Image (tube, rainbow, N blue to C red):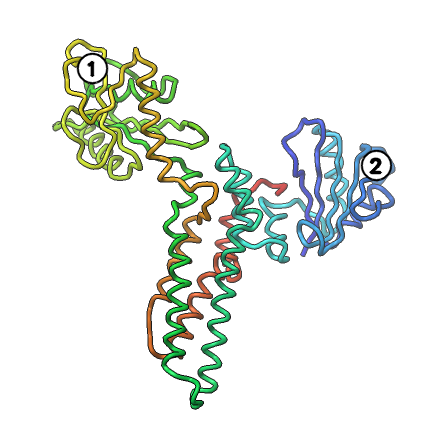
Amino acid sequence: MTTIVAVSSGRPPAAIAVIRISGGEAFAAARALTGSLPPPREARVRALRAADGALLDRALMLVFPGPRSATGEDLVELHCHGGRAVIDAVEAALLATPEVRRAEAGEFTRRALINGRIDLAEAQGLADLLAAETERQRVAAIATAEGRVSRAVRDWMERLSRLAAQVEAMLDFADEDDVTDTGVEALREACALLAADMGAVLDVPPIERLRDGVRVVLAGPPNSGKSTLINLLSDRDVAIVAPIAGTTRDRIEAPVTRNGIPFVLTDTAGLTETDNVIERMGVERTVESIARADILLWLDDQPPPREAIWVLPRADEDDRAALSASGRIVVSREDAESIARLWEAIGERASLLIPRESDLSLDRRQRDACRIAVAALQHGSDDALIIGEQLRSASMALAGILGIDATEAMLDSLFGQFCIGK
């Protein structure tokens, strides 16, 4: 495997730039710049020089012999000054060494996976951590990156292994008197218990809720105040507001973070009967948005078509002040407290849709694998041989969460999300 190099810190210019070198020629490439290497894991200042002896920079150097390194390979870090010219000069000198090339996106982390330093679940957690924009996202991502999901999956797989060993013993000694139907029944009960434990994790809201945000859709007839309300909820002008019905003809989305929870607010075209082709397309998209909404804000005087937060908008207007507010949250652009009350209602519902910090939450790929494992364990049988096959199927599904059978396409998709230096 070739040796790779990349800047793993932020974009230059910066006070410090960390250049990482990983692979079999990492020490040789670093030695060509400095003449000597410091003791492993001890930071030392070294002069970095080009092949002709010209001084490139003075940098802090650390070396990490493999396999006890972040990538599982020999790894060198150069903490240089963060100017573009310095980085370019140091990289050019390193790339002059045979078998050294620039790293691809996520290649350092991918090598850590290949070399057994992390598993696929931890790598996904690291990707989420790099993309985290809210405190809840950070907490959830760091828990996964630190092995929370991996530990749970390995525990499930260990329980499967013990059950599989019991099946093997039953099959090897099928003619013995102590192999009875009671043993098969105990196996079935153990499988059901394990399936229930995994099913409890599947009942936890998916981690995507924290990544993608809770979808809050504003819907109602034309000119019902949807655009005004989305501007008030997002605290900025994201939608055009006009007294003319049909001003909004397409979905308008506004990402908002509230109390650490990410939301995606969606303004929609008014629901109405129309012969206008464009307006009809807008209405169709509104219907789609309503169906996909995690939380629906309904701004019509008629009851909502599905479970929703029923809003009485524009309550400050004379012709609406007399309307019944029963079961509705009254809002007015002149009353900031009314918007706060609406946010409180939205937050209460959202809290049920996102995982808590104490929850073990899985992403879509992990949940699919877990469902396969649960289905295999719930497929009851009186035949020990069939139970053994069910255990094998469940174990294979869980192994996919850890990347034991990960395909190249899966790895390319994951590590393509990373920056070059990670």
Q: Which mark identifies residue 200? A: none
Instruction: Tell me where residue 272 sits by quadrant.
Output: top left
Residue 4: percent from the left, percent from the top? Answer: 68, 48
Q: Which residue is mark 2?
A: 45
User: Which residue does the image show at 46% across and 72% down from the upper left?
Assistant: 163
Left or right placement of residue 151 versus residue 183 in this view? right
Q: Earlier in the sequence, mark 2 or mark 1?
A: 2
Rate crowding at label 2 as few (under 14), some (14 to 19) or many (20 or more) other CA atoms within 10 Å. some
Mark 2 falls on what kind of element? strand
Residue 418: percent from the left, percent from the top? Answer: 55, 42
Q: Is residue 354 above or below residue 181?
A: above
Left or right placement of residue 142 versus residue 374 in this view? right
Q: Is residue 304 above or below residue 174?
A: above
Q: Which mark identifies residue 244? A: 1
Mark 1 falls on what kind of element? loop
Quarter of the picture holding the C terminus: top right
